[in-house]
Amino acid sequence: MENNLRKIRGSCLCGKVTFEIDKAVGPFEICHCNRCRKVSGSNGLAAVGVKTQDYYFLSGAEYIKTFAAPILHRPPAYHSHFCSNCGSPVPLANPEGDWTEIPAGLFDDDLGISPDKHIFTEFTPAWDSIADDLPQFDQRQLYKYRTGKDWPSAT
């Protein structure tokens, strides 16, 4: 059975927070920023884009807690959502907007897509090296890629 005929399931480590999606649309990025590394406890955080209309929260809203890290450069703040029982990063029960990002490691089923890029690569720790052929973007390159504009000057 193909993914477009069934839901793709996901859950946290303890299984208290569960959700499903119809499909993953991407982007499917591996972020190497300091904050994503700390949330994942690894060299980066792989996250996949999902349309909110294709996202179905099933259980565990009462276990979801949010940490809003201080703003570094400009709003919005970095938000980390996690299961208060097991500590896994998790999606919100009711994300706002047309699109949301879900940590890829939470999915129990095949997503049908693979990572498409590394982002914030200037923060890759010295003990790590990116060994695949995926495109790599530092924050200035990513800004230009996403907006079509040059990095704003500090004035």
Image: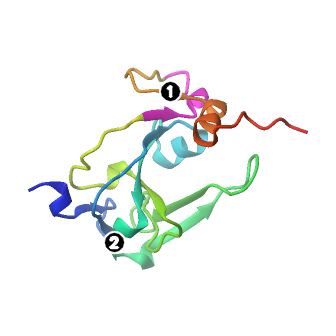
Give residue 142's position: percent from left, percent from top: 59, 35
Residue 123 forms part of the magenta stretch: yes
Q: Pointer 1: residues within 10 angstroms few (<14), some, or many (20+)?
A: some
Image quadrant assignment for residue 116? top left
Q: Which span is picked out in magenta?
A: 117-127
According to the picture, the residue beneath numbered tag 2 turns out to be 56
Q: Residue at x 39, y 69 (%)?
A: 53
x then y, percent, for residue 106: 33, 55
Q: Can you name the residue that lies furthest to the front here?
A: 148
Counting from the top left corner in percent of width and height, residue 12 is at 34, 61
Side of 64 where 155 appears, left or right: right
Pointer 1 residue:
136
Residue at 52% x, 41% y is: 37
Is label 1 in a helix, a strand or a loop? strand
Q: In the displayed structure, would residue 122 be above or below residue 72?
A: above
- Residue 140, position in %: x, y? 67, 32
Magenta stretch holds residue 37: no
The outermost residue toward the bottom is 62
**Quadrant for the N terminus in the image:** bottom left
Per the image, label 2 sits on a secondary structure element best described as: strand
Q: In the image, 52: left or right of 146?
A: left
Q: Amino acid at mark 2?
A: Tyr
Quarter where residue 51 is shown: bottom left
